[in-house]
Amino acid sequence: MKENESATVEPEVRIENGEKIEIMMANENHYGYVDTILDTVKKAAKARGTGIASRTHDYILEKMKEKKGIIAFVDGVFAGFCYIETWSGKKFVANSGLIVAPEFRGRGLAKHIKRKAFELSRKRYPEAKLFGITTGLAVMKINSEIGYRPVTFSELTDDPEYWKECEHCVNFDVLSRNNYTRCLCTGMLYDPSEHKDNPEPWKKWEKGEKSEKGHWMKTFKKIISLPFAVKTHKRGTKN
Ligand SMILES: CC(C)(COP(=O)(O)OP(=O)(O)OC[C@H]1O[C@@H](n2cnc3c(N)ncnc32)[C@H](O)[C@@H]1OP(=O)(O)O)[C@@H](O)C(=O)NCCC(=O)NCCS
């Protein structure tokens, strides 16, 4: 599969509520943040009680050296990170290890980090399918806005190395019991061949627009809120 090793993305720098937000490709200036990243992931995994890809110091450092990491800062303080990995001979790309430091959550940082990682993935591996598995609603929302759709695991990479990482997850028994066909995570896929009409969505995001393909989440929300709507209607309450 085609790879543009020299692919880059422009850093995103903006002032929000008087704070300087920076999201960029990790480079040699960021090697010193590897332990902070690992520590933040470790604490989040403990608090969440479920799987977040845990990696070694060398692995994250290697990602930075390979120009496959996206790092964020708020007023110069580490705020978040994500990296890209390839599977099945670069036919698949995963944006993994997303983490936002607790003090900077809930203000759109994960969304912007994922968008940068997506842009980098598309530019570096233009023919690859992008995918991820998650139990997190935040990541489902972000992915669906980008244009990912939920799929069964059969649509994702069958690279054993990818699934090996799940051995560290507390739910691994569920995955192995189901012969790696399903688990508690939702598989999500972005197939570039389905988005030929909008190959560079980041150009629209810069103008604040969402992906036109990210509508499944709205439908999903409508479906799950229907019983509540019915109940509310029966009780005759309106707010
Ligand atoms: C998940 C995580 C990365 C989100 O980071 P964040 O910067 O707070 O997320 P954002 O502010 O960009 O939120 C993006 C969307 O998700 C929603 N969201 C954020 N956190 C959420 C949560 N805990 N539950 C439900 N929705 C959530 C936001 O409301 C937003 O939706 P909107 O665009 O409709 O408003 C962060 O909480 C984190 O690092 N958690 C621990 C690590 C982890 O779970 N990583 C993901 C592994 S799959």
Image (cartoon, rainbow, N blue to C red):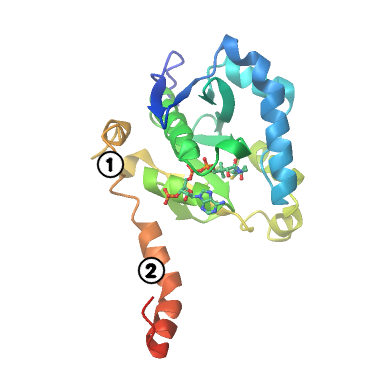
Whether residue 220 is visible: yes
Give the position of the C terminus as an image quadrant. bottom left
Q: Quadrant of residue 66?
A: top right
Q: Which mark is residue 222?
A: 2
The vertical placement of 110 against 144, above or below, is above
Q: Which of these two is toward me, 140 or 186?
A: 140
Horizontal side of 195 relative to 44 (left or right) equals left
**Local SS, label 1:** loop
Q: Which mark is residue 209?
A: 1
Q: Amino acid at mark 1?
A: Glu
Give the position of the N terminus as an image quadrant. top left
Q: Position of residue 129 (x, y in %)?
A: 44, 38
Density class for disc 1 (Cα within 10 Å; few <14, some 14-19, many ≥20) is: few
**Local SS, label 2:** helix
Inter-mark Cα distance, 2 to 1: 21 Å
The answer to whether mark 1 is within 8 Å of ligand 1 is no
Horizontal side of 235 relative to 76 (left or right) equals left
Q: Quadrant of residue 201?
A: top left
Q: Residue at x 53, y 22 (%)?
A: 68
Q: Farthest residue toward the left?
A: 197
Q: Farthest residue toward the top?
A: 28
Q: Residue at x 27, y 39 (%)?
A: 196
Q: Amino acid at mark 2?
A: Lys
Q: Residue at x 46, y 15 (%)?
A: 5
Q: How many marks?
A: 2
Q: Position of residue 82 (x, y in %)?
A: 56, 31
Q: Earlier in the sequence, mark 2 or mark 1?
A: 1
Horizontal side of 181 relative to 234 (left or right) equals right
Q: Which mark is residue 138?
A: none
The vertical placement of 75 against 184, above or below, is above
Q: Position of residue 170 (x, y in %)?
A: 75, 52
Whether residue 50 is visible: no
